[in-house]
Amino acid sequence: MNETPRKNLSKELLESYRVKPGQPVQLGTVDPTATGPFERKKRARAELELLRDELVELQECFYAWDKRSLLIVLQAMDTGGKDGAIEHVMKGTNPQGVEVTSFKVPTAEELSHDYLWRVHKATPARRMIGIFNRSHYEDVLVVRVHSLVPEEVWSQRYEQIREFEELLAANGTVILKFYLHISKDEQARRLQARLDDPNKRWKFAKGDLKERALWDDYMAAYADALNRTSTEDAPWYVVPANHKWYRNLVIMSILVDTLKSLNPTYPDPEEGLDDVVIE
Amino acid sequence: MNETPRKNLSKELLESYRVKPGQPVQLGTVDPTATGPFERKKRARAELELLRDELVELQECFYAWDKRSLLIVLQAMDTGGKDGAIEHVMKGTNPQGVEVTSFKVPTAEELSHDYLWRVHKATPARRMIGIFNRSHYEDVLVVRVHSLVPEEVWSQRYEQIREFEELLAANGTVILKFYLHISKDEQARRLQARLDDPNKRWKFAKGDLKERALWDDYMAAYADALNRTSTEDAPWYVVPANHKWYRNLVIMSILVDTLKSLNPTYPDPEEGLDDVVIE
């Protein structure tokens, strides 16, 4: 595995997936089938494992360092691969420092508060990596597509979300947001695969087809969300996600680069340990 | 790794570590250096990896099954290996289904409630594996040893804890409690190793020596806690923990056996999927 030189995804390539403030992304122009410099999954998977070793070391140090927290937001259409990304990117890390929150349909109690209430409660404490499987972005996605609140309400949320994430960032939370970008055809293949495989059939929900029929509305809502809330402190990345192995590698690469850039260090020992005798 | 026959820890051996109601354990008579049928760590580590594959599959199914939750309570003296056990047993599982809660010195808000308040909030939801790194047992351990509350208060807690855990069990939570049993000598070696290794020195806290001086009081408090709260539904296991590799293997074995005994299955698919066409 180590015999050939490493084939890291370049910073430039990863940067090209970032949604830059002031340069709106058109989702229709981003290729969900892209695989960067990799033609086959074998090399990409080997690279993923090398990066995993780095991630495990970096996470250990980040946790001990205890100075910052890291929040990863995952959004995607149904079958887009949020669960798979969590499993395959985070596998091997120390569960003590990782906390996954899956946001479902809000409960009655959650609905009796503002939409950021349950989200704020779930933000990662210092030293933790928090992962949101769906997030407050549902409040400008499904909520907008289904008109669950009037436009004058959801249209204010982009700014509220920017300010909320700015607050987190100002208090030491590093934020990475990934939109897992699959094509409508790929969703059809994945839904069909669930239907066809008796072991996966339980994952198929007829309700998913209703959402699929609203594909174009969702794409418009996603484009707005990405363009209006990708900031320097809380960037969105559009991750080509038709190929699961490439999706995982892109997320892993950005995660490892981000942790490295923070330069975490192990804490200094207490003073006066030189004379200590253990009896 | 698969060439030699497997060398599972037998049910009888694992059962011998369980604290049986009505048969009080004397911690002084349990050998912390025990390694079961293993003489060296190499074979035990290979066995651990085989069990890890089983754990990963079982966890996936347990999560999808969505019928029960599993709570693992870890208690030990300082350096006893709680953090290491979490890392080495749970590594590889899907972080989405695992939730670790580390109980620290209670906050002002926590202290303004009863001692089980913060614990109840942290119990695992259905489908989750929750791990308590320290727990409500501190309220009959450190609290008792340091007389933080009067004896008439802490002495009532054993029954309260039994009843609390019974409530959880009656509502579908499977409970496993592990006391990681190290010798006082082994603690000295581990503390000394932290002092001697510049990379580990930051882990050394002088306060740990004050607790170490109270070793016998802690052993008495542990013995009472184990004997008075090990029930059929929430058993304590005394895990020989001087050898980290054996400690991990014992916990892993009990965890895998427990998950298997629940017979989790993937859910049935929705009705009426046969006619579905994906457009």
Image (cartoon, coloured by chain):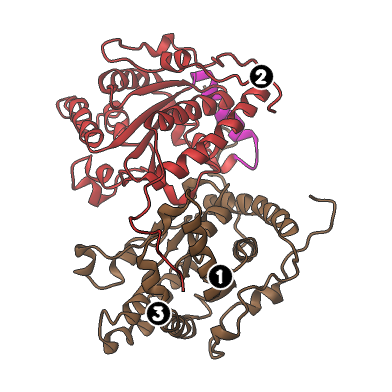
Chain colours: A red, B brown
Badge nearest the viewer, 3 or 2: 3
Q: Is residue A44 visible?
A: yes
* Nearer to me, A135 or A262: A262
SS at mark 3 in the image: loop
Name which residue lies at 54% across and 16% down. A33
Name which residue lies at 77% across and 63% down. B7
Few, some or many residues within 10 Å of mark 3 (<14, 14–19, 20+): few
The quarter holding residue B216 reads bottom left
Residue B125, relative to residue A5: is it above or below? Answer: below
Chain of the residue under label 2 = A
Residue topped by disc 3: B214
Q: CA distance from mark 1 to mark 2?
A: 50 Å
Few, some or many residues within 10 Å of mark 1 (<14, 14–19, 20+): some
Residue A199 in magenta stretch? yes
Q: Which mark is residue B186?
A: 1
Residue topped by disc 2: A40
- Tell me if A263 is positioned left or right of A171 in this view: right
Q: CA distance from mark 3 to mark 2?
A: 60 Å
Name which residue lies at 58% across and 13% down. A37
* Nearer to me, B239 or B58: B239
Q: Amino acid at mark 1?
A: Glu
Q: Are marks 3 and 2 in contact (CB under 8 Å)?
A: no
Q: Amino acid at mark 2?
A: Arg
SS at mark 2 in the image: loop
* Nearer to me, B177 or B146: B146
- Tell me if A232 is positioned left or right of B271 in this view: left
